[in-house]
Image (spheres, rainbow, N blue to C red):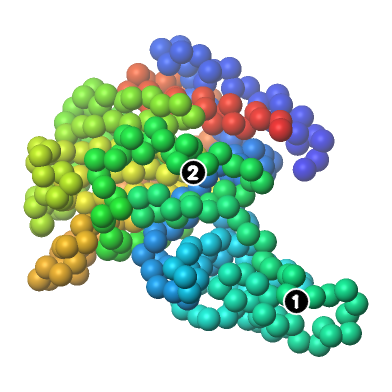
Amino acid sequence: MSESALLDMRHLDTRGVRQPITSASHAPGAIYSSEEILAQEKKNIFMKEWLCVARVEEVEKPGDYYATRIIGEPVLIARNQKGEINAFANVCLHRGVEIASGCGNTETFTCPYHAWAYDLDGKLASAAFMRESKDFDPKTSSLKKIHSGVWAGWIFLNFSANPTPLAEALSEFASDVDLLKMENLRLGSKITLDLPTNWKFVVENLMDVYHVRTLHYNSFGKHRGPPENYPFHLRKNGGTCTRYEARPMTPGGETLFGKMPALANEPDNFAMSAHLAPNMQVIARIDNVHPLVMWPVTATTSRTYVYNLYPKEWFDLPNFAERIDVYDKYMRLVLAEDTTMMNSLQNGITSANYEPGRFSTLEKGIHHVLNDYFRRLDQSA
């Protein structure tokens, strides 16, 4: 990164955001469009935090693997023959080629460039034509391990050398969402959205109760309580949690299953939303949980994964696939409404006429998340 780029970030005017919400203004447009800001986000946020990357069902059996890229970093998650889940840098020890792509089941990962092979524990099993290379021993060579852990059926990883233990890092968030018992749920479907917008706009949109009755009036907005009835609880490290009233995510607002066992004692209009910084939002209704994880791709594009979770015992119900397809289609409809507006946001913040507007007190969650975001972005260590 150039010295001038660093200087620009040091002089980014965030004073408006850092005021109490009744006096605050939204963030400068540069944080949603600058590649230099994205580079700083990678260094000071994504390379230091615990990040949710997958469900355990995506690597359910020994030999199952899932390869992905996280803010440009190639990552490989694999379950070994002992049933242990590990994460590695998906970077061949020879020339750096990604040794796996997509997902599947295997006993050995073979680099597609020069056929170096690795086992499920990341150990180099063979390297052709390397016998004459002095002081090279395949037995002492392994893929670089990335810290990983499992919580409530989710796989997390952390790129830093000495991360805070996962249980400690998630303690407050885990307490908020424990009633959902996500460890007893299974992945029914996974929606992938490639969006023409900065990742933070997606994060903010998911906690923006201000827009629901306007943008989503013809979908789920008509089934929601008034926006002032969203008691946002602000947590440390940019977390939020709120419980509110909303119907299931179906066209008629009626459940196709009944209540999840974990929520048997909750009202039919139970809903909650909890944010885990930097990029995970757990949203629930009485009959399913649909967390979203938002990843930057470039400064102005992003990828969002929507995980639709249902109780394990429901998977054997008649017409289960057909029923969850109703939820998926409705979810896509709602997300399409949001995508149109977020695309407009992305265009608007690059306008010469854009000036950050004042916060509404309904945007309490966004204000809290942005203030903690700037705290993290400012880290120099």
Q: Would residue 350 be visible to someone looking at this image?
A: no
**Amino acid at dot 2:** Leu
Q: Vertical placement of 374 versus 340: above or below? A: above
Residue at 59%, 31% in the rendered image: 376
Disc 2 designates what residue? 166
131 to the left or right of 252: right
Q: Secondary structure at mark 1?
A: helix
What separation in Å lies between label 2 and label 1 (alpha carbons)? 32 Å
Q: Secondary structure at mark 2?
A: helix
Q: Vertical placement of 305 versus 322: above or below? A: above
Residue at 77%, 43% in the rendered image: 1
Q: Position of residue 203 (x, y in %)?
A: 43, 40
Disc 1 designates what residue? 138
Q: Position of residue 223 (x, y in %)?
A: 14, 39
The crowd level at tag 1 (other Cα within 10 Å; few <14, some 14-19, many 20+) is: some
* 90 or 148, nearer to the observer: 148
Residue at 49%, 29% in the rendered image: 237
Location of residue 38 by image quarter = top right
